[in-house]
Image (cartoon, rainbow, N blue to C red):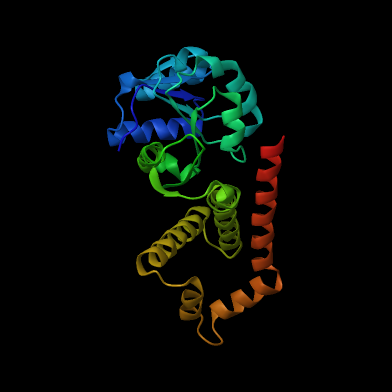
Protein backbone atom coordinates (compact mmCIF):
# COMPACT_ATOMS: atom_id res chain seq x y z
CA UNK A 1 0.00 0.00 0.00
CA UNK A 2 1.31 3.47 -0.88
CA UNK A 3 0.15 6.68 0.74
CA UNK A 4 -1.77 9.00 -1.48
CA UNK A 5 -0.38 12.29 -2.74
CA UNK A 6 -0.06 15.15 -2.55
CA UNK A 7 2.46 14.91 0.27
CA UNK A 8 3.22 17.96 2.42
CA UNK A 9 6.52 17.77 4.30
CA UNK A 10 6.67 20.30 7.12
CA UNK A 11 10.39 20.82 7.75
CA UNK A 12 13.16 20.43 5.21
CA UNK A 13 15.96 19.37 7.54
CA UNK A 14 18.17 16.29 7.24
CA UNK A 15 15.49 13.77 8.17
CA UNK A 16 12.85 15.41 6.02
CA UNK A 17 15.24 15.40 3.09
CA UNK A 18 16.22 11.77 3.70
CA UNK A 19 12.58 10.71 3.55
CA UNK A 20 11.94 12.76 0.42
CA UNK A 21 14.96 11.28 -1.31
CA UNK A 22 13.98 7.75 -0.37
CA UNK A 23 10.40 8.17 -1.54
CA UNK A 24 11.51 9.55 -4.89
CA UNK A 25 14.10 6.81 -5.36
CA UNK A 26 11.54 4.14 -4.52
CA UNK A 27 8.93 5.65 -6.86
CA UNK A 28 6.43 6.02 -4.01
CA UNK A 29 5.73 9.63 -5.02
CA UNK A 30 6.60 11.73 -8.02
CA UNK A 31 8.25 15.13 -7.59
CA UNK A 32 5.15 17.05 -8.60
CA UNK A 33 3.14 15.56 -5.73
CA UNK A 34 5.54 16.68 -2.95
CA UNK A 35 5.53 20.13 -1.36
CA UNK A 36 8.02 21.07 1.36
CA UNK A 37 7.49 23.85 3.90
CA UNK A 38 10.86 25.22 5.01
CA UNK A 39 11.44 28.71 6.44
CA UNK A 40 15.12 28.88 5.47
CA UNK A 41 15.45 30.17 1.88
CA UNK A 42 18.86 28.56 1.46
CA UNK A 43 17.46 25.17 2.41
CA UNK A 44 14.48 25.67 0.10
CA UNK A 45 16.79 26.36 -2.82
CA UNK A 46 18.97 23.36 -1.99
CA UNK A 47 16.00 20.98 -1.76
CA UNK A 48 14.57 22.18 -5.06
CA UNK A 49 17.95 21.83 -6.77
CA UNK A 50 18.70 18.39 -5.30
CA UNK A 51 15.27 16.78 -5.56
CA UNK A 52 13.19 18.91 -7.91
CA UNK A 53 10.40 19.35 -5.38
CA UNK A 54 8.41 22.52 -4.80
CA UNK A 55 9.35 24.36 -1.62
CA UNK A 56 7.38 27.08 0.14
CA UNK A 57 8.02 29.16 3.23
CA UNK A 58 4.68 28.61 4.98
CA UNK A 59 3.23 25.36 6.28
CA UNK A 60 -0.33 26.47 5.58
CA UNK A 61 0.47 26.77 1.89
CA UNK A 62 2.09 23.34 1.85
CA UNK A 63 -0.79 21.46 3.49
CA UNK A 64 -3.52 22.91 1.26
CA UNK A 65 -4.99 19.93 -0.60
CA UNK A 66 -2.52 17.45 0.93
CA UNK A 67 -3.56 13.83 1.45
CA UNK A 68 -0.57 13.14 3.71
CA UNK A 69 1.13 15.64 6.03
CA UNK A 70 4.56 14.72 7.40
CA UNK A 71 5.59 16.74 10.46
CA UNK A 72 9.39 16.58 10.24
CA UNK A 73 10.20 19.10 12.95
CA UNK A 74 11.83 18.98 16.39
CA UNK A 75 9.57 18.14 19.35
CA UNK A 76 10.37 21.47 21.00
CA UNK A 77 8.64 23.40 18.21
CA UNK A 78 6.00 20.90 17.13
CA UNK A 79 3.23 22.55 19.12
CA UNK A 80 3.73 25.99 17.62
CA UNK A 81 4.10 24.55 14.13
CA UNK A 82 0.88 22.53 14.35
CA UNK A 83 -1.03 25.41 15.94
CA UNK A 84 -0.10 27.60 13.01
CA UNK A 85 -1.40 25.23 10.33
CA UNK A 86 -3.99 23.06 12.09
CA UNK A 87 -7.09 24.63 10.57
CA UNK A 88 -5.56 24.37 7.09
CA UNK A 89 -4.95 20.60 7.26
CA UNK A 90 -7.58 18.77 5.16
CA UNK A 91 -9.95 16.76 7.33
CA UNK A 92 -9.21 13.54 5.44
CA UNK A 93 -5.41 13.87 5.51
CA UNK A 94 -3.19 11.40 7.35
CA UNK A 95 -0.87 13.35 9.67
CA UNK A 96 2.48 11.70 10.35
CA UNK A 97 4.78 12.95 13.12
CA UNK A 98 8.43 12.05 13.66
CA UNK A 99 8.81 14.22 16.80
CA UNK A 100 10.34 12.25 19.68
CA UNK A 101 8.22 11.94 22.79
CA UNK A 102 5.10 13.65 21.42
CA UNK A 103 2.09 11.35 21.64
CA UNK A 104 -0.58 10.93 19.00
CA UNK A 105 -3.11 12.02 21.63
CA UNK A 106 -1.36 15.34 22.05
CA UNK A 107 -1.17 15.93 18.30
CA UNK A 108 -4.81 14.90 17.86
CA UNK A 109 -5.78 17.52 20.45
CA UNK A 110 -4.25 20.22 18.24
CA UNK A 111 -6.11 19.13 15.11
CA UNK A 112 -9.76 18.85 14.09
CA UNK A 113 -11.74 16.07 15.77
CA UNK A 114 -11.21 12.70 14.13
CA UNK A 115 -7.84 13.53 12.58
CA UNK A 116 -5.85 10.43 11.63
CA UNK A 117 -2.42 10.70 13.28
CA UNK A 118 0.44 8.23 13.01
CA UNK A 119 3.58 8.56 15.11
CA UNK A 120 6.94 7.40 13.77
CA UNK A 121 10.45 7.35 15.18
CA UNK A 122 12.93 7.04 12.30
CA UNK A 123 16.70 7.38 12.60
CA UNK A 124 19.52 9.03 10.69
CA UNK A 125 20.67 5.95 8.70
CA UNK A 126 17.58 6.77 6.63
CA UNK A 127 19.96 9.17 4.89
CA UNK A 128 21.53 6.12 3.21
CA UNK A 129 18.28 4.13 3.06
CA UNK A 130 19.32 1.94 5.98
CA UNK A 131 16.99 3.46 8.56
CA UNK A 132 14.92 1.84 11.29
CA UNK A 133 11.45 3.34 11.76
CA UNK A 134 9.02 2.46 14.54
CA UNK A 135 5.35 3.15 13.71
CA UNK A 136 2.28 3.59 15.95
CA UNK A 137 -1.22 4.70 15.05
CA UNK A 138 -3.44 7.10 16.97
CA UNK A 139 -7.08 6.61 17.86
CA UNK A 140 -8.54 7.60 14.49
CA UNK A 141 -5.79 6.05 12.33
CA UNK A 142 -7.00 2.92 10.57
CA UNK A 143 -4.96 -0.22 10.02
CA UNK A 144 -4.68 0.87 6.40
CA UNK A 145 -3.31 4.28 7.46
CA UNK A 146 -0.68 2.66 9.66
CA UNK A 147 0.37 0.19 6.97
CA UNK A 148 0.59 2.98 4.40
CA UNK A 149 2.87 4.98 6.70
CA UNK A 150 4.93 1.86 7.27
CA UNK A 151 5.34 1.53 3.51
CA UNK A 152 6.33 5.19 3.28
CA UNK A 153 9.22 4.73 5.70
CA UNK A 154 10.08 1.40 4.12
CA UNK A 155 11.46 3.47 1.26
CA UNK A 156 14.35 4.52 3.52
CA UNK A 157 14.98 1.36 5.55
CA UNK A 158 13.19 -1.16 7.73
CA UNK A 159 10.00 -0.59 9.71
CA UNK A 160 8.05 -2.19 12.54
CA UNK A 161 4.65 -1.41 14.07
CA UNK A 162 4.46 -1.32 17.88
CA UNK A 163 2.06 -0.13 20.57
CA UNK A 164 2.57 3.56 21.20
CA UNK A 165 3.33 2.99 24.87
CA UNK A 166 6.64 1.46 23.70
CA UNK A 167 7.65 4.37 21.48
CA UNK A 168 9.87 6.05 24.09
CA UNK A 169 11.80 2.83 24.66
CA UNK A 170 12.21 2.33 20.92
CA UNK A 171 13.37 5.92 20.57
CA UNK A 172 16.09 5.28 23.14
CA UNK A 173 17.34 2.26 21.17
CA UNK A 174 17.01 3.05 17.47
CA UNK A 175 16.31 6.78 17.44
CA UNK A 176 19.24 7.72 19.69
CA UNK A 177 21.23 4.59 18.91
CA UNK A 178 23.23 5.97 15.96
CA UNK A 179 24.88 8.39 18.39
CA UNK A 180 25.94 5.53 20.68
CA UNK A 181 27.41 3.65 17.73
CA UNK A 182 29.18 6.78 16.46
CA UNK A 183 30.79 7.30 19.88
CA UNK A 184 32.03 3.69 19.81
CA UNK A 185 33.52 4.22 16.34
CA UNK A 186 35.09 7.49 17.47
CA UNK A 187 36.74 5.90 20.50
CA UNK A 188 37.90 2.79 18.62
CA UNK A 189 39.43 5.11 16.02
CA UNK A 190 41.11 7.20 18.70
CA UNK A 191 42.51 4.09 20.35
CA UNK A 192 43.76 2.72 17.05
CA UNK A 193 45.58 5.96 16.31
CA UNK A 194 47.15 5.88 19.78
CA UNK A 195 48.63 2.50 18.87
CA UNK A 196 50.05 3.58 15.52
CA UNK A 197 47.23 3.26 12.96
CA UNK A 198 46.29 6.15 10.71
CA UNK A 199 42.87 7.72 11.41
CA UNK A 200 41.58 6.47 8.05
CA UNK A 201 42.66 2.88 8.66
CA UNK A 202 41.45 2.86 12.26
CA UNK A 203 38.01 4.23 11.39
CA UNK A 204 37.72 1.91 8.41
CA UNK A 205 38.45 -1.09 10.64
CA UNK A 206 35.92 0.05 13.24
CA UNK A 207 33.13 0.80 10.75
CA UNK A 208 33.48 -2.43 8.81
CA UNK A 209 33.70 -4.48 12.01
CA UNK A 210 30.44 -2.95 13.25
CA UNK A 211 28.79 -3.40 9.86
CA UNK A 212 29.91 -7.02 9.56
CA UNK A 213 28.95 -7.92 13.12
CA UNK A 214 25.49 -6.41 12.71
CA UNK A 215 25.01 -8.33 9.46
CA UNK A 216 26.22 -11.54 11.06
CA UNK A 217 23.78 -11.23 13.95
CA UNK A 218 20.94 -10.30 11.61
CA UNK A 219 21.48 -13.12 9.11
CA UNK A 220 22.18 -15.91 11.57
CA UNK A 221 19.82 -14.89 14.37
CA UNK A 222 22.66 -15.70 16.75
CA UNK A 223 22.34 -14.40 20.30
CA UNK A 224 24.92 -11.66 20.96
CA UNK A 225 26.23 -13.54 24.00
CA UNK A 226 26.98 -16.56 21.81
CA UNK A 227 28.95 -14.37 19.43
CA UNK A 228 30.95 -12.95 22.34
CA UNK A 229 31.81 -16.48 23.47
CA UNK A 230 32.77 -17.50 19.94
CA UNK A 231 35.25 -14.63 19.66
CA UNK A 232 36.64 -15.01 23.19
CA UNK A 233 39.43 -17.57 23.20
CA UNK A 234 40.57 -18.40 26.77
CA UNK A 235 43.46 -16.18 27.73
CA UNK A 236 43.25 -14.28 24.46
CA UNK A 237 43.09 -10.63 23.44
CA UNK A 238 39.29 -10.43 23.36
CA UNK A 239 38.97 -11.74 26.91
CA UNK A 240 41.51 -9.18 28.12
CA UNK A 241 39.57 -6.40 26.38
CA UNK A 242 36.18 -7.53 27.69
CA UNK A 243 37.48 -7.75 31.25
CA UNK A 244 38.54 -4.13 30.95
CA UNK A 245 35.15 -3.12 29.54
CA UNK A 246 33.37 -4.89 32.36
CA UNK A 247 35.56 -3.31 35.05
CA UNK A 248 34.79 0.10 33.56
CA UNK A 249 31.04 -0.43 33.77
CA UNK A 250 30.48 -0.67 30.01
CA UNK A 251 27.25 -2.66 30.23
CA UNK A 252 25.88 -0.55 33.07
CA UNK A 253 26.63 2.64 31.16
CA UNK A 254 24.67 1.41 28.14
CA UNK A 255 21.65 0.58 30.28
CA UNK A 256 21.89 3.95 32.02
CA UNK A 257 22.13 5.76 28.69
CA UNK A 258 18.97 4.10 27.40
CA UNK A 259 17.14 4.88 30.64
CA UNK A 260 18.18 8.54 30.39
CA UNK A 261 16.92 8.72 26.81
CA UNK A 262 13.57 7.18 27.80
CA UNK A 263 13.22 9.69 30.62
CA UNK A 264 14.00 12.61 28.33
CA UNK A 265 11.49 11.40 25.74
CA UNK A 266 8.81 11.36 28.41
CA UNK A 267 9.82 14.87 29.49
CA UNK A 268 9.52 16.12 25.90
CA UNK A 269 6.05 14.64 25.74
CA UNK A 270 4.93 16.42 28.88
CA UNK A 271 6.20 19.92 28.09
Relative to residue 74, is residue 252 drawn left or right? Answer: right
151, above or below 255, in the image? above
Position of the C terminus by quadrant = top right
Q: Looking at this view, name the residue that lies furthest to the left.
A: 27
Is any part of residue 151 visible from this angle?
Answer: yes
**Image-quadrant location for residue 220:** bottom left
How many discs appear? 0
Residue 107's place in the image compared with 39, above or below, is below
Q: Nearer the viewer, residue 82 or 215?
A: 82
Q: Farthest residue to the bottom: give it.
A: 234
In the rendered image, the quadrant that contains the N terminus is: top left
Q: Is residue 39 visible?
A: no
Image: 106 above or below 266: above
Q: Quadrant of residue 55?
A: top left
Residue 168 drawn at (x, y percent): 60, 48
Identify which residue is drawn at 44% across, 30% down.
17
Q: Residue 110, how many percent across, how many down?
A: 60, 25
Amino acid sequence: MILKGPLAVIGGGRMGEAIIGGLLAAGSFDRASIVVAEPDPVRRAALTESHGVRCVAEGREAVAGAATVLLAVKPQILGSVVDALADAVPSDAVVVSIAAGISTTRIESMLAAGAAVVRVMPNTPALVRQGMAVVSGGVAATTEDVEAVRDLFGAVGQTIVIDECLQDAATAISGSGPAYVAILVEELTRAGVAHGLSPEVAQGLAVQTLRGTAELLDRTGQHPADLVRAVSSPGGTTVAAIEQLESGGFRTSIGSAVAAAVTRAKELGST
